[in-house]
Amino acid sequence: MYNYILATHIIFIVCWFAGLFYMVRLFIYHTEAQEKPEPDRTILSNQFVIMEKKLWYIITVPSMFLVLAAGTAMGFIGHLFGESWLLVKLGFVAGLVVYHFICQKIMKQMVKGVFKWKSTQLRMWNEVATIFLFAIVFLAVLKDTLNMIYGTVGLIALFVVLMIAVKIYKRVRMKK
């Protein structure tokens, strides 16, 4: 039974992250559409609102709940809740859930026509989910063999590289 729950957990992790990654990408396009002249701005904004709501409520939110349910079931069935690696992983999962709800808040603001984030800020925000993904997967796969110091340094280095890549991409876009 454990392996079936694990498979379900992994499938819905993929769905949840796909939703989170694509959602923030839609936020970027939605934000950039505000620079377009009318009627393009309104047409694009209305379409992005539809796409964001469907992605969020049909894929992203249900996937998050299924990930959490399957993870909880695995924790009980496998008697994993006492494992130190799992407690650290759950800390990252809690951070990802916070990230998820911040994305929901951004979506609701955009539906109301409130755009507080610039597209470059949203590109950087999108990389935060990447950091959570790396941390969670490495902890789940390596478990106790993960040296937390190397892992932390590696995550920080990854974050720095991703932020530099976003800045370089912005410069390239501005030249075009």
Image: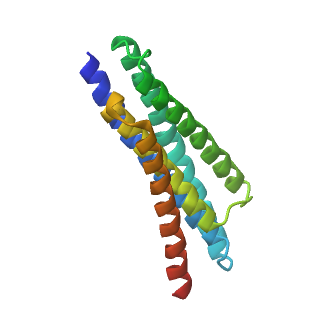
Q: Residue 72 vs residue 57: left or right?
A: left
For the point 57% across and 41% down, the residue is: 100
Q: Position of residue 129 (x, y in %)?
A: 50, 48
For the point 36% across and 35% down, the residue is: 146
Number of numbered discs present?
0
Colour scheme shown: rainbow
Q: Is residue 96 above or below residue 22?
A: above
Q: Is residue 119 above or below residue 11?
A: below
Q: Residue 123 vs residue 42: left or right?
A: left
Q: Where on the picture, by quarter, is residue 66?
A: top left
Q: Where on the picture, by quarter, is residue 136?
A: top left
The answer to whether residue 97 is seen in the rendering is yes
Q: Where on the picture, by quarter, is residue 77?
A: top left
Q: Is residue 66 above or below residue 122?
A: above
- Return the residue nearer the eye: 151 or 101: 151
Q: Position of residue 90 (x, y in %)?
A: 49, 28
- Return the residue nearer the eye: 57 or 138: 138
Q: Residue 123 vs residue 136: left or right?
A: right
- Return the residue nearer the eye: 153 or 160: 153
For the point 48% across and 41% down, the residue is: 60
Q: Position of residue 93 (x, y in %)?
A: 50, 34
Q: Residue 140 vs residue 110: left or right?
A: left
The answer to whether residue 51 is seen in the rendering is no
For the point 57% across and 48% down, the residue is: 53
| Location of the N terminus (image quadrant) | top left
